[in-house]
Amino acid sequence: MGEEFLQSRTKRHANFRLCNVTGFTTELLEICADEPAFHVLFIPGNPGVVTFYIDFVESLYELLGGHGSVTAVVGYISHTMQNWEQGMVFTLQEQIDHKVVFIEQELTNNKVPIILVGHSIGAYASIEILKRIPKKVFYCIGLYPFLAVNPESRDQFIIDKISRSSTISVALSALVGLSGLLPNSVKRFVVSKVIGKKYSNNAVETVCSHLAQLAETPDWAFMREKQDKIAFLFGEDDHWGPFQMCEEISRQVPGIVVSIEREGHGHCFCGSTDGSTWVARHVTALINKQLSRSSL
C-alpha cells in the first residue's frame, strides 16, 4: 500500500518543450522534481528523436522517487523534421559543445549535482562532457555505449559506405525525422525493426561523418582517473557496443563499474516499454549506489 502511494505521488508525465541553445532550436523532454537533490541529464543515441525515450524518462523519474529532476532529451541539432537549421550538418564535437552550453545555460544551480546518462553515441558525448566540466558532473552512466568504431561490424562498414552517398544520406535523415511525427506504437516499430536492426540509432550520426570521428581508441587515462564517477551497461550481440569493448574497458580500467544486460532488450531498449523500464531500474540502482557512497 505504501509503495503504491509513493508511486502515485511520483508518477508524472514528461513535458515536451523547445529552447534556444547557441542560436539553435533544441527539443527537450523533462520532468521537474519539486525539490531536486540531483538532476539527471540524458543524452540520446541517434537519431536523437526525443519522443523515442518517453517511457524511459517517465519510468526513471518514478523509480527515483521524485528526488531528482530528469531532463531527457537534449536532442541533436538538425535532427528534426522541422528543418530549423535548413539542412546544416554539425560535427560530433559541435553537438557536444551544444550540450555543454545547454548545461551552462539551463542547469545553473550549482548546489544540484548533475548525473549524465548517455545512450549509444550519447555515452561518448557524456564522457566528453565530464572532461569539460568535471566539477558540475557527479556521475556518468553509459548505456550500450558506442565509444569507438568496431572494425568487425558489417553494419558499420555498410553505414560508412552509405554516408558517402549524399542521396541515400538525405533519404535516411528524412525517414528518421518523419518518425518523430508518428504515434508511439508506430515509432517503436520503426526503431526496433528498421533503425534498430539495420542501422541502429546511430544512422543519422554516422551519415553526418561521426563514424570517422570515433575511429580513435577511448581515452583510457581519463577513464582511469575518473573511474569512480563512470559506469557502463553493455548488451549482448551489440555491434555498436560490442562485448570486446566491454572486455577492453575491464582490462584497461579494472575498477570501473561494467554490467551486461542479458534480458534481450538490446541496443534499442527504448523501442519497448519493458526495455525502457528494465534499463530505468538499472540506472536507478546505479544512481542510488553512487549516492550512498557520497554525502549527498
Image (cartoon, rainbow, N blue to C red):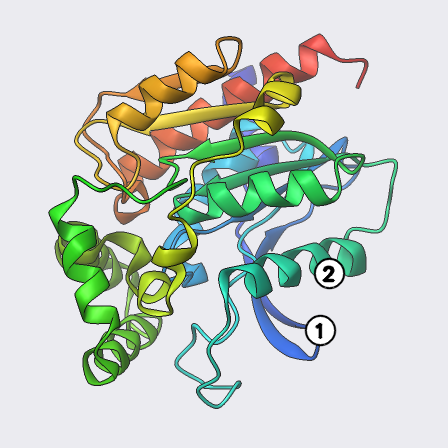
- Which three-letter amino acid code belongs to the residue tagged 1? Thr
Classify 245 as above or below 54: above
| The C terminus - image quarter | top right
From the viewer's perspective, tell me whether residue 171 is left or right of residue 21.
left
Q: Disc 2 marks which residue? A: 101
Number of residues whose C-alpha sits closer than 10 Å to that of mark 2, classed few (under 14), some (14–19) or many (20 or more): few
Are dots 1 and 2 in contact, CB under 8 Å? yes
Of residues 228 and 61, the one nearer the viewer is 228
Measured as percent of width and height from the top left, residue 257 is found at 49, 15
Element type at mark 1: loop
Of residues 193 and 94, the one nearer the viewer is 94
Measured as percent of width and height from the top left, residue 227 is found at 60, 18
Query: Which residue is at a point 42% across and 43% down the rendered structure image?
Result: 216
Cα gap from disc 1 to disc 2, whole angstroms: 7 Å
Q: Would you say residue 201 is visible in this rendering?
A: yes
Measured as percent of width and height from the top left, residue 13 is found at 52, 51
Classify 217 as above or below 106: above
Classify 174 as above or below 51: below
Q: Which one is earlier in the sequence, the residue at label 1 or at label 2?
A: 1
Seen from this angle, which residue lies furthest bottom? 86
- Which three-letter amino acid code belongs to the residue tagged 2? Val
Question: How many marks can you see?
Answer: 2
Which of the labelled discs sits on residue 22, or is there none? 1
Element type at mark 2: helix
From the viewer's perspective, tell me whether residue 19 is left or right of residue 205.
right
From the viewer's perspective, tell me whether residue 35 is left or right of residue 33.
right
Query: Which residue is at a point 60% across and 38% down the rendered structure image?
Result: 116
Q: Where, by quadrant of the figure, is residue 249 drawn?
A: top left
Query: Which residue is at a point 59% across and 12% down the rendered structure image?
Result: 289
